[in-house]
Structure formats: structure tokens, C-alpha cells
Image (spheres, grey):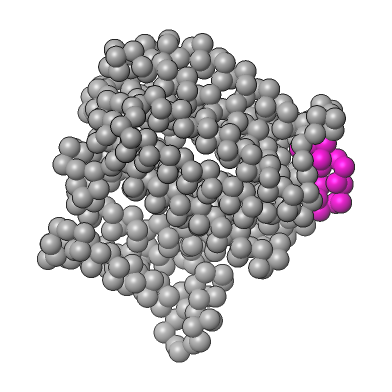
């Protein structure tokens, strides 16, 4: 992948994250107050359930990226188009069937999770409306897989940004117009359809222009990705269920007001994790290429650089959010969510370790060696459900958050260990070069956050005065630890910090 294309893809990824983050920052407090906690929780539950339906791609979306990249590199364009068309129409059929199934079962789901009585009968309609998005989300996944496999992330991100902005603007209009929960829920399938149309539209500008055609669909092409897709299906399904299972546990075992608090408390930690992971999302084809060449040196370098960069992005932001948690929640949503401070902090710890695991996962996926991670994901999910249910019954929402953070804290080192072994990288070298520098830089940074928290007013102004110098302090210390104290051109320092 050319250097300029890497930069373009990473930049567009961050543009997508910035857009999503801004929308979340603006809409969350508005919807929390406008819908009130119970209806806000019901909408959040429906969105989570809809998101989980992405597992119906059977692992083919992730596999498609890898095989599109391979076929394009080999010049097998006709086979590439047949594969994309087959997966697209398969996903379209499965998506339509799934949306019908969701509508049929929505009443049972609402009753099982005690949502129906709390919402005066509208919960099943909300679940049906939001769940119908899957009819467009699944075929969209195949088109995005095509674009990512061709290394055209910027085109996919442009379509996603447009659909997210359209839904956010329409949501604000609905709120301003006094419309209720159901019209707001109906925006989700509309936005999903708009996204699918946008993704199809931008395919004309790819390096291999491809438009899914039913005439080109050939079920025999699925044999090419069947083996890898079966493992990615297990991995992706278990990972998705683990990341969202806390929502279902809280909806089933705790009051809906707790679910509303959980949704709010997870927003910033989720953003930290996504922000840190963006640069790695474009690395998958690069790692696959290195693995195909048997280039262990490139894979070692990837593990060192990606680990340090992930920690460098996640640690200072998480540190500031951890110390100023109460102020952030109060200013952002209101005093009614201050009970979520322990949850907010626990999920920040979760976010840092979840960010770090993307480095070994990207390596394992790129090498096609995901059997270990797939098995670990299943064990993780089983442990989270069992221990999470026990935590809910014994300690409520804070205990549940601590359990999830602890489980993630165990899983990430195991994945790192497996990746280091496959890359033939000594753990001591990895710790010394990739982990220790950002951790050492974090210690005085957190000390500054704690000191400034005690001295500065607990306002947006105080938060800014604490956070900005703290993050600058972190990167100044990290640069010294990585590049040394000798005078060097700033370009050299930046290169050593992020690319060596």
C-alpha cells in the first residue's frame, strides 16, 4: 500500500470517528432528557440488539476483505466480482429474512427483558423498527468489505459519514418538532438504506469498479472463503456478544434506569477505544501481505509500533477522563447519571485493554491464524455471562463493570502472548520498547491530572486547562523516552515516535 494511501485511509478513519464522536456528544444528553431514562434505555437496547444482528454475516464480511485484497493483487478481477456479487445477494436475502424474524419475535423479546410494561406497549415496535435496519446493514457490510479490501477506506468512510450526519440532523428535527420515540426509531432503517445507497454509489471510484450483479453471483465462489469465514464467524460472534452482553444482562436483571446509566457511562470509554484503534484498521491488508511473504521482520515491527501507538493514544485520554469522570458526566448529561461514575471509570480501564488487543488481533487475522483467538472469545463470552449475572445480583451495575474490565484485562495479555510467539518477538523486547515508554509517561501525567483536579474549578474551563497541558506533557515525556534527549529535527522525532 502506497504511503499516501495509508495516510489518506487513516485520516478518513479519524474523520469518521470524529463525526461519530461529535454526534454522540451532542445527541446523547438531548435524547436522554427528551425521551426520559426509560425510553432512552429502550432505544439503546433496540440499537444494541440490531447491532448484534451483524453476526448473521457468518464471518464472511471479515473474510471478504482478505480475499478481495488477494484477488485484486493477483489480477483475478472476474473472480473478485463474482465473489462480491455472491456475498452481496446472500447478505441481502439473509438481512430481509432477519428483519422479518425480528418483527415476529419483538414482542417476546420485549416481554423477556421486561421492556413492554415499562414503555406502555411501544417497546416491541421500537425493536421492530430499529431491527429492520439489518435488511440494509448486511449488504452494506459486503460493499464495505469490497472497499476495504481494495484499500479504499476513504470512500467507505465518506458514505458512512454522510449517512450518520443525515440521521443526526433528522433526529434533531424530530426532537425540535416534538415527535416521539417511534419516529426517532424509524430513522435507523432509513439511515441504513441511505448508507447502502451511498456505499454502492462510491464503488464507481474504486481501483476496481464493481457493482453487485445477480447475474455474476455464483455460490461456488463461497468455497474460497468458507474455511476462514467459519473461524471469523466464531471470533466475531463471540466478540460482539461479549461487548454487548452487559446491556442484555442489565436489561434483564436490573431496572431500566440502570440501563440508561450504563449506556451513558460507556460512551466516552467506547470513543477512547475507537480512537486508538483507527490506525490499525488500515493495517490488515499490510499484515496479510507481510505474512504471505513470510516477512517476520515486518510483523515484529508491526507489533512494536502498533502496541506503542495504541497505548500512546489511549492512556493519556483515559487518564484525564478517569480523574474528571464526575465533572464530565455532570456537565454532559446531568446529576442524574452521577451514580455511573464507578461504571464510567471501570469501562475506561476496559477501553485501554480492549484497544491494546487490536494489535495482536490484527496480526492474527492478517496471518490467518485465528483459531486461538476464536476459542478464547468463546470462553470469554461464557465467563462474562456467568460472572456478569452474578455481579448484577450481588453488586449491581458497578460490580458488573468491574467484572467486564477484569475479564478484558486477562484476555488481552493472552492474545498478545500468542501474537508475540507467532511473530517470533521476545516478550521482554516488546515490553521494553512498546509498553514501558507510554506507561512511564502516563505516571507523571496522571499526577498532573490529580493535582489540577484538586486546584482547578470543576467546570468545562477547569477540565480544558487540566486536560490539554496533561496530554502535551504525556507526549513530551514519551518523545524523550523513545527518541532520546539529543537535539533532532522535528520530523525525525515524529518518525521515531510513531513509525520506528
State the quadrant of the C terminus: bottom right
| Viewer can see residue 380 | no
Question: Can you say whether 371 is above or below 416 in the image?
Answer: above
Q: Is residue 214 magenta?
A: no
Which residues lie in the magenta part?
70-84
Name the one closer to the observer, 437 or 35.
35
- Out of 41 and 342, give the one closest to the viewer: 41
User: Quarter of the image holding residue 457?
Assistant: bottom left
Using the image, determine if residue 390 lies above or below residue 347.
Answer: above
Q: In this view, does 223 lie to the left or right of 146?
A: right
Q: Which residue does the image show at 45% across and 88% down from the upper left?
A: 486
Q: Where is residue 226 in the image (x, y as percent from the top left)?
A: 75, 31
User: To which quarter of the image does residue 248 belong?
Assistant: top left
Rendered image quadrant of residue 211: top right
* Residue at the image point whose x is 56% and y is 70% from the top: 499
| Left or right placement of residue 153 versus residue 492 in this view | right
Q: Residue at x 53, y 43 (%)?
A: 163
Q: Main secondary structure of the magenta part?
A: helix
Percent of width and height locating residue 295: 72, 60
Amino acid at each position: 500500500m502506497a504511503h499516501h494511501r495509508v495516510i489518506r485511509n487513516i485520516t478518513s478513519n479519524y474523520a469518521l470517528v470524529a463525526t461519530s464522536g461529535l454526534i454522540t456528544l451532542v445527541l446523547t444528553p438531548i435524547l436522554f432528557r427528551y425521551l426520559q431514562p426509560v425510553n432512552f434505555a429502550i432505544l439503546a437496547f433496540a440499537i444494541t440488539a440490531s447491532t448484534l444482528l451483524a453476526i448473521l454475516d457468518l464471518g464472511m464480511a471479515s473474510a471478504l476483505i482478505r480475499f478481495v485484497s488477494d484477488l485484486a493483487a493477483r489480477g483475478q478481477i472476474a473472480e473478485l466480482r463474482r465473489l462480491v456479487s455472491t456475498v452481496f445477494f446472500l447478505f441481502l436475502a439473509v438481512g430481509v429474512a432477519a428483519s422479518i424474524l425480528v418483527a415476529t419475535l419483538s414482542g417476546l423479546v420485549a416481554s423477556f427483558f421486561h421492556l413492554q410494561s415499562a414503555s406502555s406497549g411501544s417497546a416491541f415496535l421500537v425493536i421492530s423498527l430499529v431491527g429492520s435496519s439489518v435488511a440494509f446493514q448486511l449488504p452494506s457490510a459486503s460493499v464495505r468489505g469490497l472497499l476495504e479490501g481494495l484499500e479504499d477506506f476513504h470512500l467507505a468512510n465518506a458514505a458512512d459519514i454522510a449517512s450518520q450526519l443525515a440521521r443526526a440532523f433528522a433526529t434533531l428535527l424530530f426532537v425540535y418538532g416534538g415527535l416521539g420515540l417511534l419516529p426517532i426509531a424509524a430513522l435507523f432503517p432509513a439511515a441504513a438504506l441511505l448508507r447502502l445507497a451511498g456505499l454502492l454509489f462510491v464503488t464507481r471510484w474504486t481501483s476496481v469498479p464493481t457493482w453487485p450483479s445477480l447475474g455474476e453471483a455464483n455460490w461456488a465462489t463461497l468455497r474460497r472463503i468458507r474455511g476462514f469465514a467459519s473461524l471469523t464467524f466464531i471470533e466475531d460472534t463471540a466478540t460482539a456478544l461479549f461487548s454487548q452482553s452487559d446491556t442484555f444482562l442489565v436489561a434483564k436483571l436490573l431496572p431500566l434506569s440502570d440501563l440508561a446509566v450504563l449506556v451513558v457511562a460507556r460512551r466516552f470509554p467506547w470513543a477512547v477505544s475507537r480512537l486508538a484503534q483507527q490506525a490499525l484498521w488500515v493495517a490488515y491488508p499490510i499484515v496479510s501481505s507481510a505474512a504471505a511473504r513470510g516477512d517476520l521482520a515486518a510483523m515484529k515491527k508491526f507489533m512494536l509500533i502498533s502496541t506503542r501507538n495504541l497505548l500512546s493514544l489511549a492512556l493519556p485520554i483515559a487518564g484525564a477522563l478517569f480523574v474528571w469522570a464526575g465533572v464530565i458526566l455532570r456537565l454532559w448529561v446531568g446529576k442524574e447519571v452521577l451514580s455511573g461514575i464507578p461504571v464510567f471509570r471501570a469501562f475506561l480501564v476496559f477501553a485501554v485493554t480492549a484497544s491494546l488487543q487490536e494489535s495482536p488481533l490484527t496480526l492474527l487475522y492478517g496471518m490467518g491464524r485465528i483459531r486461538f483467538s476464536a476459542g478464547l472469545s468463546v470462553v470469554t463470552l461464557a465467563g462474562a455471562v456467568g460472572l456478569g449475572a452474578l455481579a448484577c445480583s450481588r453488586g449491581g451495575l458497578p460490580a458488573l463493570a468491574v467484572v467486564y474490565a477484569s475479564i478484558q484485562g486477562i484476555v488481552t495479555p493472552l492474545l498478545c502472548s500468542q501474537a508475540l510467539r507467532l511473530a517470533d518477538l521476545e516478550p521482554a523486547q516488546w515490553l521494553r520498547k512498546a509498553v514501558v515508554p507510554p506507561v512511564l509517561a502516563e505516571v507523571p501525567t496522571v499526577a498532573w491530572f490529580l493535582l489540577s483536579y484538586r486546584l482547578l474549578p470543576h467546570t468545562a474551563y477547569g477540565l480544558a486547562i487540566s486536560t490539554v497541558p496533561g496530554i502535551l506533557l504525556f507526549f513530551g515525556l514519551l518523545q524523550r523516552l523513545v527518541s532520546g534527549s539529543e537535539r533532532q529535527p522535528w520530523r525525525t522525532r515524529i518518525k521515531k515516535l510513531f513509525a520506528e
